[in-house]
Image: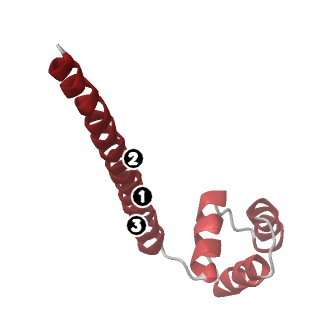
Amino acid sequence: MASEALEFAKGTLTTGAQPAIVRKLLQDKFGTNLMGKNLINIKQTLQGKSQEEWEATAEYLQKLKKWFRAALYAVAEEDFAEEKSKLLTQYGKMVAAYFEEN
């Protein structure tokens, strides 16, 4: 691909043009047949996020989701343990009182 065509593609994608339209313009103006996927990759590169950064972000969000889920389970487990302790204390006294009467 000619450097003029690449600069044209970068310029139009930077201003927000759709990759499909840029592809058609490149074909008409420069005779360059560039796949839409390649134009999308160029657009992502221009926006400043590399594939590694996106993967790292996705991985971080997955870890955050697991941590959040674990935290919720821990809180629920703690609440359950408190309720269980209260019930055992309450019913334990009732059972002990029953045996004292009989």
* Left or right: 53, with 32 as reference point: left
Which mark is first along the chain, 3 or 2? 3
* Left or right: 24, with 65 as reference point: right
Quadrant housing residue 87 = top left
**In the foreground, 68 or 4:** 68
Q: Which residue is mark 2?
A: 76
The image position of residue 92, as x and y in percent, is 23, 31
Q: Which residue is mark 1?
A: 68
Quadrant housing residue 13 = bottom right
* Left or right: 57, with 66 as reference point: right
Which mark is first along the chain, 2 or 1? 1
Q: Which residue is mark 3?
A: 60
Given the image, on which type of amino acid does mark 2 rest?
Answer: Ala
> Mark 3 falls on what kind of element?
helix
- Residue sitting farthest toward the top: 102
**In the foreground, 91 or 71:** 91
> Mark 2 falls on what kind of element?
helix
